[in-house]
């Protein structure tokens, strides 16, 4: 009976944790240094870096160059500073109360 | 008429020898035949007009003093005559007072010639400041008659010092500053008037400096007014007008959800290019947020040494991109963007 109950339970969805920490990427989007926890896949970190570099590059082409970028998501914040073609990127999940306040 | 002027000139105290000619060609032939001190010419003459005569005479007889005496009262002709290096441009006198003034003027010129003072002629395209400095530095005594269209002004110079000035509405220093604010015009140097009461006591350097400062301030105000007028005009022609009134806003760009619809902008030259970038960037970052599970993308902000900007999206209206003055603090950018966005959505 116990076995039946156990096998009939619906699988719980995997909880996705948001990455936190800081990392730097060079102009070719290679990760140079990182304090992002190991459980965050490297591919994901590189994805973030690639998108950030693309935003910097696109802005230059659109004649709106800038050196610092803030992305505010409902539950996450990314801050990036351009560094000689690469970037230093800060990832910070936002606590619920911060989300409510914004 | 020629005979009348001949008589008038013969009455001058210096008793000059006066020759007359009824055409430009004959006048040039006369000048070729013997040396002359002064040429008085009309502009409207048969066959060869006065300007043609001036061109030839100035080239062939560079030291000859020339006065234009004409009924043609056109500023263009006046300018062209002065550009040819004429000494004075006189309207044909219409009253006994004007005849007297004309006679005094000719006598003054002949007197200068008699004293063999020499000097250069043909001053053209010089600023009034240059002219005043020349008169003052050379310790001259004269009256500068300055005209700009219908505006007339006079500046009295006595022994190299500015003693008085008048315009239609002002006298003294106010008049002097008013005359110096005129951007262009013509001038005549009239005989000195030593009897003129002195109303200006400041040095010519001080006066020129004050005038330059006043002019700079006035230009600054004008530029500000023009800028704000241009900005207001542009904004009023757009629905973005209310958004531009927030502190520090330098440009506003709205990008509709429909990719075919044009962007609307204020204060931007490359709106289409920026609109395309804004749309692409947002899509890219929304996708990133979805991958991360970070929730809705609420705002994108960029900071630079040139200017700051912020980007926000509304499901119905599309994208709003606002540029901010670089001196606006970063926290203020966020705060102002929220206000602008709320205003835009509402």
Image: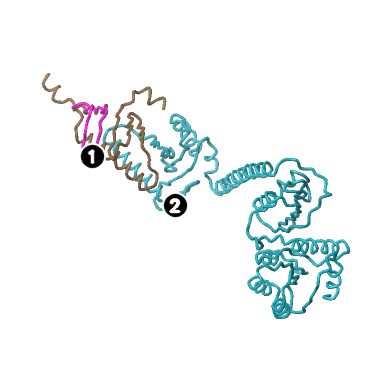
Chain colours: A brown, B cyan
Q: CB of mark 2 within 8 Å of CB of mark 1?
A: no
Q: Would you say the magenta stretch is mainly helix, strand or loop?
A: loop
Closer to the camera in the image, B343 or B78: B78
Chain of the residue on which disc 1 is drawn: A
Closer to the camera in the image, A9 or B93: B93
Closer to the camera in the image, B195 or A20: B195
> Is disc 2 placed on a helix, strand or loop?
loop
* Residue A6: % across, % down: 14, 22
* Residue B332: % across, % down: 47, 30
Vertical relation: B193 (above or below) B30: above
Same chain letter for marks 2 and 1: no
Work out which residue is located at the far top of the displayed protein and give it.
A2
> Is disc 1 placed on a helix, strand or loop?
loop
* Residue B36: % across, % down: 73, 72
Determine which quarter of the picture holds residue B300: top left
User: To which residue does mark 2 refer?
Assistant: B262
Q: Quadrant of the C terminus of chain A?
A: top left
* Residue B11: % across, % down: 87, 68
| Left or right placement of residue B136 versus residue B198 in this view | left
Chain of the residue on which disc 2 is drawn: B
Q: Which residues are magenta?
A: A14-38
Vertical relation: A64 (above or below) A100: below
| Left or right placement of residue A4 versus residue B228 in this view | left
User: To which residue does mark 1 refer?
Assistant: A29
| Left or right placement of residue B101 versus residue B26 in this view | right
Q: CA distance from mark 2 to mark 1?
A: 34 Å
**Label 2 Cα neighbours within 10 Å, binned few <14 / some 14-19 / many ≥20:** few
Q: Quadrant of the N terminus of chain A?
A: top left
User: What residue is drawn where x is 44% and y is 29%?
Assistant: B331
């Amino acid at each position: 009976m116990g076995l039946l109950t156990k096998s009939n339970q619906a699988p719980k969805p995997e909880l996705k944790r948001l990455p936190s920490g800081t990392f730097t990427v060079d102009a070719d989007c290679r990760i140079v240094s990182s304090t992002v926890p190991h459980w965050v896949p490297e591919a994901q970190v590189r994805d973030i870096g690639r998108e950030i570099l693309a935003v910097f590059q696109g802005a230059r082409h659109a004649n709106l160059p800038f050196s610092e970028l803030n992305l505010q998501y409902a539950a996450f914040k990314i801050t990036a500073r351009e560094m000689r073609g690469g970037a230093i990127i800060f990832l910070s999940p936002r606590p619920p109360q911060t989300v409510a306040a914004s | 008429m020629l005979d009348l002027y001949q008589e008038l000139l013969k009455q001058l105290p210096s008793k000059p020898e006066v020759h007359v000619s009824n055409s430009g060609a004959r006048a040039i032939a006369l000048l070729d035949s013997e040396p002359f001190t002064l040429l008085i010419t009309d502009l409207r003459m048969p066959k060869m007009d006065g300007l043609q005569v001036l061109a030839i005479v100035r080239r062939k007889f560079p030291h000859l003093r020339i006065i234009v005496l004409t009924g043609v009262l056109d500023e263009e002709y006046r300018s062209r005559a002065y550009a040819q290096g004429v000494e004075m441009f006189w309207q044909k006198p219409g009253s006994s007072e004007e005849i007297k003034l004309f006679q005094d003027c000719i006598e003054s010129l002949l007197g200068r010639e008699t004293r063999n003072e020499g000097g250069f002629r043909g001053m053209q395209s010089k600023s009034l400041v240059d002219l005043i400095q020349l008169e003052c530095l050379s310790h001259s005594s004269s009256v500068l008659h300055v005209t700009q269209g219908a505006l007339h002004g006079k500046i009295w110079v006595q022994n190299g010092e500015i003693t008085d000035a008048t315009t239609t509405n002002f006298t003294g220093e106010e008049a002097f500053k008013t005359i110096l604010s005129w951007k262009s015009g013509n001038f005549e140097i009239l005989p000195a008037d030593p009897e003129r009461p002195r109303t200006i006591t400041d040095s010519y350097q001080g006066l020129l400096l004050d005038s330059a400062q006043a002019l700079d301030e006035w230009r600054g105000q004008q530029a500000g007014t023009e800028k704000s007028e241009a900005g207001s005009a542009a904004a009023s022609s757009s629905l973005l007008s209310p958004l531009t009134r927030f502190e520090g806003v330098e440009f506003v760009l709205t990008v509709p959800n429909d990719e075919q619809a044009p962007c609307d902008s204020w204060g931007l030259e490359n709106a289409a290019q920026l609109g395309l970038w804004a749309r692409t960037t947002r899509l890219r970052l929304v996708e990133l947020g979805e991958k991360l599970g970070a929730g809705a993308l609420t705002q994108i902000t960029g900071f630079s040494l040139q200017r700051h900007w912020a980007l926000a999206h509304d499901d119905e209206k599309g994208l709003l991109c606002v540029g901010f003055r670089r001196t606006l603090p970063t926290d203020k950018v966020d705060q102002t963007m929220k206000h602008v966005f709320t205003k835009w959505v509402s």
